[in-house]
Amino acid sequence: MPDDDRQYRIVRLLSEYVRSPSLRHLRDPNSLQRLAGDIVKEVASANPIWTKWSKDREAVARPAAYCWIPPEDLRDHLNRMAGPKLTLTDVVQRLRAFNEEAYEPLPDEEERGACLEIYHRERSAGTDMPAIVAAVRQFVEERREFLERARQEAYHARVEAERLAAEERLLSGADCKWTALGNSKTLHCRVNGRLFRLEPQPDKRLHLFRVRSLDDQSGELVGRYARRTEATKIVGEMAYRPEPRWR
């Protein structure tokens, strides 16, 4: 493979990658690992398997692999470009290979209607095929980014609701797991009606106290532990043992 062609393929992959509007996606270690794998696959072989596919044909078809573009129309456009005649099977299987090579999901069935609506609207307006593919791909990327943001917002809302519910349970006097109040690093838990406090120390060890109430800043030191699981085990044992009456 000539050096300039290898360079073209690497630049194309990098350009497609940085098109993502999500900084989180760009910095994601798994995404970077896939990109590195794609680059290796692009330049590893000097004898391409897909002999009908020039770099120009692939540049048009690759973005279409992740959205809904009528393959018959894509085939007709590609056949007007330089190169051997492509059949419908050539196009469909090459699109599928793009998905498999890039570890990308196949087009989402829920996006089919909107993708085809954009396609036919732009086709009627006389838009060229590469521009149509780019417009449909942009819609898909923006939709998926929107859905990802919505999932993240829903996740954070659920975590916050669970945190508030845990605080309410602790404040109510009910038994509860280790819970922080507000942004405090100190944790409290209540087992069998007995309240315990767990305080992180500068040496990263945890000091476990048996306390009277949430306002009790002293309490009885039970022990020092390296991990929360160790303290939790001790709490589970102490909560059901007889203990001296608190003054």
Image (cartoon, helix red, strand yellow):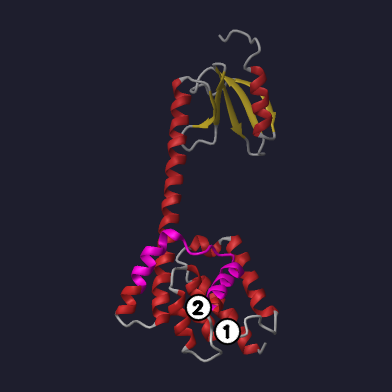
Q: Which residue is mark 2?
A: 61
Q: Considering the numbered disc 2 on the image, is that residue within a helix, a strand or a loop?
A: helix
Instruction: Using the image, determine if residue 85 lies above or below residue 191.
Output: below
Residue 20 is marked as: none
The image quarter in which residue 11 lies: bottom right
For the point 46% across and 35% down, the residue is 162
Front residue (pair 210, 100): 100
Q: Is residue 189 above or below residue 157?
A: above
Of pointers 1 and 2, the one earlier in the residue sequence: 1
Q: Main secondary structure of the magenta part?
A: helix
Residue receiving disc 1: 53
Q: Which residues are magenta?
A: 91-119
Q: Is residue 145 visible?
A: no
How far across and how far down the image is residue 226, in percent?
69, 35
The three-letter code of the residue at mark 2 reads Ala
- Residue nearest the viewer, comparing 95 with 201: 95
How would you rate the neighbour count of disc 2 (Cα within 10 Å): few for under 14, some for 14-19, many for 20 or more?
many
Task: Check the image and report above or below for 205 versus 35.
Answer: above
Q: Amino acid at mark 1?
A: Trp
Residue at 69% from the left image edge and 30% from the top image edge: 230
- Can you give x and y, in whole percent of width and height, for residue 102 in the image? 59, 68
Residue 92 in magenta stretch: yes
Do the residues bearing badges 1 and 2 touch, measured as CB atoms within 8 Å? yes
When asked about the image quadrant of residue 224, the answer is top right
* Residue drawn where x is 65% and y is 88% of the image: 3
Q: Quadrant of the N terminus?
A: bottom right
For residue 9, what is the image quadrant?
bottom right
Q: Is residue 38 left or right of residue 143?
A: right
